[in-house]
Amino acid sequence: MASWGRLMAGVVIGVAGTIYATNEDVRKRLPKAARDLPDNVRNRYKSAVSAAREASARRREEILHDLEEHGGGNHAARGVQPDPGARAEGPSARAEKTAEESTVESE
């Protein structure tokens, strides 16, 4: 029996929406608050989307910061640019460092 109630509620809402969308006289007779309802919903949606994007960007920055703190290094695969202050070591610099370490150990 509950499903019939939902069905009837859907039908009533659908008919009311159709009348509202197609009949300008009905829209004019509605109170101001009811006429502005679609604009209010649209504004709330836009502000909610904006807040969600801001929160998502902030959280992404926090996660990447935590990864950097825990030795995550450069996350180029995730679109994070390397730290411009860090010294970039190429293959030759790494080879020299390895050679120096090997000579120090043998002494």
Image (cartoon, helix red, strand yellow):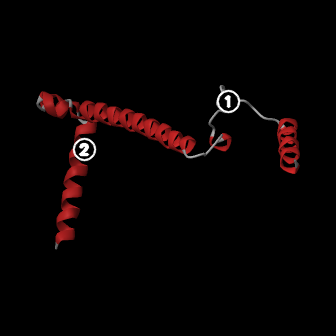
Residue occupied by mark 2: 17
Residue 20 at what x, y percent from top left?
23, 38
- What's the residue type where badge 1 is placed? Ala
- Asked whether 74 or 20 is in front, the reply is 74
- What's the residue type where badge 2 is placed? Gly
In the depicted structure, whether residue 103 falls above or below residue 1: above
Residue 66 at what x, y percent from top left?
50, 43
- Asked whether 79 or 27 is in front, the reply is 79
Residue occupied by mark 1: 86
Q: Secondary structure at mark 2?
A: helix
Q: Residue at x 38, y 32 (%)?
A: 50
Q: Which tag is nearer the camera, tag 2 or tag 1?
A: 1
Residue 86 at what x, y percent from top left?
67, 30
Q: How far is mark 2 from mark 1, CA to CA? A: 60 Å
Q: Which mark is residue 33?
A: none
Quarter occupied by the N terminus: bottom left
